[in-house]
Image (cartoon, rainbow, N blue to C red):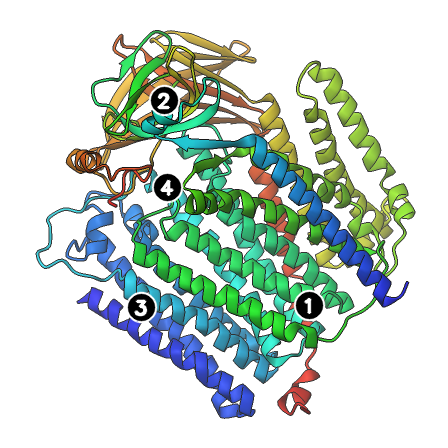
């Protein structure tokens, strides 16, 4: 093989691998991404039951109730709307009423958000409750919870 | 006073860095030995001054000097001494200081060890290294100064994030930074080579050990971070495809590719242009990692603070170095001379194969990590790309690498014999098939992919062993002869085989843990017993105790195996009053490479307590494999060829290049 042919083989195989990677990425992006929504988004976009989403907001104070067998219910709010969430399992260490939370799961036809994962922000700067409330009131609070904006 | 000394030392270091960025470069251009000789002493002095600054900050932490903002925000007088020290880099400012300290350390090491480098190359390398140093020193002094004071010093600090109060913080960031920043050396060498427009095998012989060292630290850093997350977060997971984890995985993939392509360049003088590009990309990915973690575009445990000016500043550094590096590459790379020829089926070919798939895998991680950021910036939609995405993209691209891995070392340089290599791997392939069948039979209706994963791991492991057996002729010649051959084998050959063995081990751990790991979430009352596989865990009750700066709630479990008392496991939960946060301290019980894992959840109103219990078969292989890889790297690094083999003849010629 001449130098030119060898280079063609190299470039050809490089493009082949790249194409393979691109196909994999595109197909995976179609099937396996999850959209992040605030409770207001969920209300306004009329997200259908069963679609997998991430629901983010603050845990509404006074709504956390524990049931039998590790069942937990709480509401996630962004100050405008609130969505009831049902979860079964252990809540993360940093889960607290009035603090930021992200729940992953899908809406139940009954109007509940059935979460299979609950994440609480690993907060570096402790945010006093007043700050969170202020942010909430001003509507500045987005998924960037736990941080001064 | 101490803080001011540190601040002053940092400013002086910046001054030195600026001198070092320009003077040696001009010297190399004019072939002026005196100007070029400036680089060495400034590199050493720059390191010394940054070390003084770092020591000053550490002293403020140890003394709990809360008049320094950084100490006030991240420390507490009741914190144990070890966490006062590690807390130095448990925050944004301090960790950036550690970053430049390590950068300067590498520059100083090149200055010290670079005696046999051509003078112009050494001057250019140190100048480029200093560009990076100057940019980051400017960043620290301009936007993240750790030495700022508070007018009226508070009595008490706000404490370090409890999750970071762990021995993991003492080890993980320094290791990771040694890896990240170690790649700056190959970057500087690549840029210097482009500036000179000349590159040869001696260049690769110089770059390879540095890349190898950086790669080893990076491997340990990533593995350590994974193990830390595993035991500290209490979720039993060891990899979450979190953007910050990906930020450390991408440089690792690029460094692994660079390591392999540098071999081709050193041995065969081929793939020069590609190796240079990889060296630029590997460090670029380190910078992108730093940007992702430090700029606050991501939210995670690693993201210490979000200050928009910092993000913009790091972004500017990023564009300058990555854009500049790639532009220089586009301009100068075509001038580099072509290297040696090789057939597609050859050792070089196998290493190219490895490089293609590693970089493609790295690209998918890159897309998965940055796509959400790009989409949010463009459309405002917030998405999360999680494990399913990476399993579908990264997984399939890694399988060919692992399949090809045993073949590579068995192929000859230039023109290899694929059939011959396949014949020599028959035993390894046979064992892999046996493993697949055995797992199928044993596992019954389990996941279909598991047997193949185990088979692949077995193939990788036995393939590495085959490589050694073939090289020593263990089964063909008398054992004494094989022993002599084994001792005569270059250490780098041992290193390759052992590192590849480690890859197989890690894969074995990953497949085994993700297939047969079991999780139980239960709520328990004292004297309840949970049975898991052949283990019985009896819950004894809860106790509380006061730690130095936290309160600890401990659950006591008696573990029985087939009725015999094995051990006591005490998972606990710590509540830190200062930050009103708590951490989970999981209890781990290792049996061979498998582990029992208990993490404590909430206490319920009826007096019961929620716990997560896991049994994770062979989970320790995941990290053990990484350690084995590093041992392989260490052996390869100790190879005589890399230490004394670098030839000197270029010296005279390089002093007076015939332009």
Q: Earlier in the sequence, mark 3 or mark 2?
A: 3
Give the residue pinned by disc 4.
Answer: B301
Secondary element under disc 2, as helix, strand or loop, is strand
The residue closer to the viewer here, B479 or A91, is A91
Q: Earlier in the sequence, mark 4 or mark 3?
A: 3
Mark 4 vs mark 3, CA separation in Å: 29 Å
For the question of whether residue B345 can be seen, the reply is yes
Question: At which x and y percent is residue B328?
Answer: 57, 72
Answer few, some or many: residues within 10 Å of disc 1's Cα (few below 14, many 20 plus, some between 14 and 19).
many
In space, the residues marked 4 and 2 are separated at their CA atoms by 20 Å
Residue B233 % position (x, y)? 40, 32
Along the viewing direction, whichever of A114 and B493 lies nearer the viewer: A114
* Subunit bearing disc 4: B
Badge 1 vs badge 4, beta-carbon distance below 8 Å:
no
Q: Is residue B457 above or below residue B246?
A: above
Label 4 with label 3: CB-CB less than 8 Å: no
Q: Earlier in the sequence, mark 4 or mark 2?
A: 4
Give the letter of the chain under mark 2: B
**CA–CA distance between discs 1 and 3?**
40 Å
Q: Secondary structure at mark 1?
A: helix
Residue at 62%, 74% (x, y): give it: B331
Q: What residue does disc 2 label?
A: B600
CA gap, disc 2 and disc 1: 54 Å
**Tag shown at residue B52:** 3
């Amino acid at each position: 093989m001449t130098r030119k042919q060898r280079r063609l083989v190299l470039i050809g195989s490089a493009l082949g691998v790249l194409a393979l990677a691109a196909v994999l990425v595109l197909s995976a992006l179609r099937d396996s991404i999850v959209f992040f929504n605030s409770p207001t988004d969920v209300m306004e976009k009329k997200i259908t039951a069963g679609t997998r989403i991430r629901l983010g907001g603050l845990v509404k104070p006074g709504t956390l109730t524990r049931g039998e067998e590790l069942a937990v219910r709480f509401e996630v709010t962004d100050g405008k709307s609130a969505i009831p969430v049902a979860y079964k399992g252990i809540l993360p260490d940093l889960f607290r009423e009035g603090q930021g939370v992200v729940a992953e799961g899908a809406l139940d036809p009954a109007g509940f958000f059935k979460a299979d994962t609950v994440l609480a922000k690993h907060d570096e700067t402790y945010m006093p409750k007043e700050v969170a409330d202020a942010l909430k009131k001003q509507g500045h609070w987005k998924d960037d919870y736990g941080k001064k904006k | 006073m101490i803080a001011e000394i540190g601040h002053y030392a940092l400013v002086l270091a910046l001054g030195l860095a600026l001198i070092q960025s320009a003077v040696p470069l001009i010297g190399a251009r004019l072939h002026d030995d005196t100007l070029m000789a400036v680089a060495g002493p400034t590199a050493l002095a720059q390191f010394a001054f940054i070390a003084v600054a770092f020591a000053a900050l550490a002293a403020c932490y140890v003394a709990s000097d809360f008049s320094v903002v950084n100490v006030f925000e991240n420390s507490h007088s009741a914190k144990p001494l070890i966490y006062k020290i590690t807390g130095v880099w448990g925050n944004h400012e301090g960790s950036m200081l550690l970053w430049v300290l390590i950068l300067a350390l590498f520059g100083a090491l090149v200055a010290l060890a670079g005696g046999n480098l051509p003078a112009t190359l050494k001057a250019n390398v140190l100048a480029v290294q200093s560009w990076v140093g100057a940019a980051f020193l400017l960043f620290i002094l301009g936007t993240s100064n750790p030495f700022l004071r508070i007018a009226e010093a508070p009595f008490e600090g706000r404490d370090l994030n409890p999750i970071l109060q762990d021995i993991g913080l003492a080890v993980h960031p320094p290791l990771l930074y040694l890896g990240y920043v170690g790649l700056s050396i190959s970057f500087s060498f690549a840029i210097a080579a482009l500036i000179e427009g000349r590159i040869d095998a001696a260049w690769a012989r110089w770059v390879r050990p540095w890349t190898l060292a950086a790669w080893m630290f990076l491997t340990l850093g990533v593995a350590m971070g994974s193990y830390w997350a595993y035991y500290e977060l209490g979720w039993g997971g060891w990899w979450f495809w979190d953007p910050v984890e990906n930020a450390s995985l991408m440089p690792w993939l690029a460094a692994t590719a660079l390591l392999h392509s540098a071999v081709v360049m050193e041995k065969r003088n081929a793939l020069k242009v590609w190796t240079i590009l990889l060296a630029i990309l590997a460090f670029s990915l380190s910078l992108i990692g730093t940007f992702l973690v430090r700029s606050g575009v991501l939210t995670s445990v690693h993201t210490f603070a979000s200050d928009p000016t910092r993000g913009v500043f790091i972004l500017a550094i990023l564009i300058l170095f990555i854009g500049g590096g790639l532009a220089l590459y586009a301009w100068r790379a075509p001038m580099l001379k072509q290297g040696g020829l090789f057939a597609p089926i050859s050792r070089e070919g196998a290493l190219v194969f490895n490089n293609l798939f590693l970089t493609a895998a790295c690209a998918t991680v890159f897309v998965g990590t940055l796509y959400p950021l790009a989409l949010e910036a463009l459309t405002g939609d917030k998405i999360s790309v999680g494990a399913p995405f990476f399993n579908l993209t990264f997984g399939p691209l890694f399988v060919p690498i692992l399949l090809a891995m045993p073949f590579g070392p068995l192929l000859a340089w230039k023109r290899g014999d694929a059939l011959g290599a396949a014949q020599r791997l028959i035993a390894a392939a046979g064992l892999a098939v046996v493993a697949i069948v055995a797992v199928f039979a044993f596992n019954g209706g389990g996941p279909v992919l598991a047997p193949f994963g185990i088979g692949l791991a077995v193939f990788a492991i036995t393939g590495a062993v085959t490589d050694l057996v073939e090289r020593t002729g263990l089964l063909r010649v008398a054992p004494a002869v094989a022993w002599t051959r084994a001792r005569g084998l270059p250490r780098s050959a041992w290193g390759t085989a052992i590192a590849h063995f480690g890859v197989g081990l890690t894969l074995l751990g990953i497949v085994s843990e993700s297939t047969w790991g079991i999780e139980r979430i239960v709520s328990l009352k004292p004297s309840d017993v949970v049975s898991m596989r052949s283990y019985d865990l009896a819950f004894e009750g809860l106790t509380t105790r006061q730690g130095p700066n936290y309160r600890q709630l401990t659950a006591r479990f008696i573990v029985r195996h087939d009725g015999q008392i094995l051990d006591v496991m005490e998972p606990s939960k710590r509540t830190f009053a200062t930050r009103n946060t708590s951490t989970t301290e999981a209890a781990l019980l290792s049996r061979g490479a498998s582990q029992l894992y208990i993490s404590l959840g909430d206490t319920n109103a009826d007096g019961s307590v929620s716990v997560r219990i896991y049994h994770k078969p062979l989970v320790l292989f995941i990290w053990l494999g990484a350690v084995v890889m590093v041992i392989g790297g260490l052996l390869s690094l100790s190879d005589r060829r890399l230490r004394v083999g670098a030839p000197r003849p270029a010296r005279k010629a390089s002093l007076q290049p015939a332009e």
